[in-house]
Image (tube, rainbow, N blue to C red):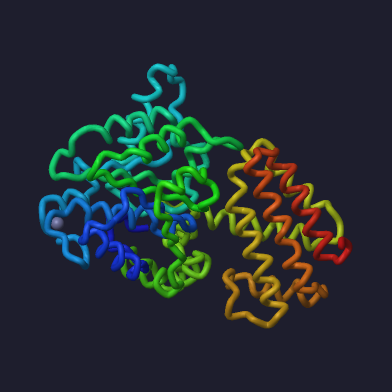
Amino acid sequence: MKSTTMHPLIGHDQLQTSLGRACHLGNLPSGVLLHGGPGVGKQHLALWIAQVLLCPHKTPSGPCMVCKSCRLSLKVGHPDLHWFFPVSRPKNTRPSNLGAALETARQDSLIRKRKNFLRPTSAYTEIQGIYLATIKHLRNQVYKRPSMGSSQVFILGDAQAMISRDSTSEAANALLKILEEPPSGTFFLITCDILRRLPATIISRTIPIHLAGIPTSEVKNFLMENLEIEEKKADKSARLSRGSIGRSLGFLTEDENEGTLEFARQKSFHLLRACLQTNRTLIYQESIKLAGTSSRTLGPVIDSLGDALRDLALFILGDQDKIVNTDTIRFLEGVCSKRNIHPRSITESFGYLDQAKEQMDSNVNAQLIITNLLINVQEKLSGRSK
Ligand SMILES: [Zn+2]
């Protein structure tokens, strides 16, 4: 895959128009919350809004693109543009040094983001978070004077990472205090995947804006034109992308390795095969392979299993044009020639996928989650369960 620095934002033209106008008129609220699926362009849009806010020559249609401020913003090097996002907790660090170590990790990550802006969604498997020490660092910066103009812009990407498993965290409370009384000329552009993963108190301090997925055709064109991906591969990744450029990248080969989402997709078909057996042998074999893996890594596999099941239902219903795993049609044909599966039993099995994802969030053992999921789906598909 060709690496790339910041490229024009794809597929959110209407939002850009209305947000650009609001920035020009000085109407943008100090807290904006961009939410939508992973990789759909939330942080990219936030960087664009930041560029508009900081550009002294902005017009109703956006930033001037040529002034010093714009050139710095485009390189994510503007001194008044502060971009925070989840990082892995540095290992072997004493609590007193944690703040500094987290800041070093963020700066290292910023260097990588500047070099190669496009990163596949779900490319990391380590636990990442936004910790209290990072929000304290952000707060110190909020109360400093801007370096170049009269505004400072803070982007807080994937803000759901502030929240630890079942409770509101100290980091979220610290952020709330800052949002309650922001200094004038300070803007917060917060992004998260699902709105309900943030505390209501934070949501109520912002204007939430939803980013929908973009048309598959636009994802495909982007891959072909900007990354020089050949048409067949671009088509396949775009179909699987759910309208997210970040997700589409996960199905491409990177440094000769299969993309992480492609790996999950192949795994999900092994799991579907196991569910289609009449006994549980394959189910146990597949589950054993997951011994010792972190349940957090199951998300993409469970999502892909959902896509595979949906494709099976579409095949049974004769709606092949909507199938996203186009390379599995012969497999689906084989399944349907041997068995009579009711599409309703497929749609009813989706509830088990949601249940598995909830267990994943509660850190239940990965092997147990998959065994239960596959047995439930197997029984549903065979018509044995109600
Ligand atoms: Zn400018």
127 vs 31, left or right, is right
In the rendered image, the quadrant that contains the C terminus is bottom right
Instruction: Tell me if residue 84 comes above or below residue 47 in the rendering.
Output: above
Instruction: Tell me if residue 254 comes above or below residue 180 in the rendering.
Output: below
Residue at screen point 37% across, 40% down: 179
Residue 365 x %, y %: 70, 38
Q: Nearer the viewer, residue 103 or 333?
A: 103
* Quadrant of the rendered image containing residue 94: top left
* Ligand 1 sits in quadrant: bottom left
Residue at screen point 46% across, 25% down: 91
Residue 171 x %, y %: 45, 33
Instruction: Tell me if residue 9 comes above or below residue 154 in the rendering.
Output: below
Q: Residue reaching furthest bottom? A: 318
Residue 69 x %, y %: 14, 50
Asked if residue 253 shows in the view, the reply is: no
230 vs 66, left or right, is right
Residue at screen point 26% across, 52% down: 50
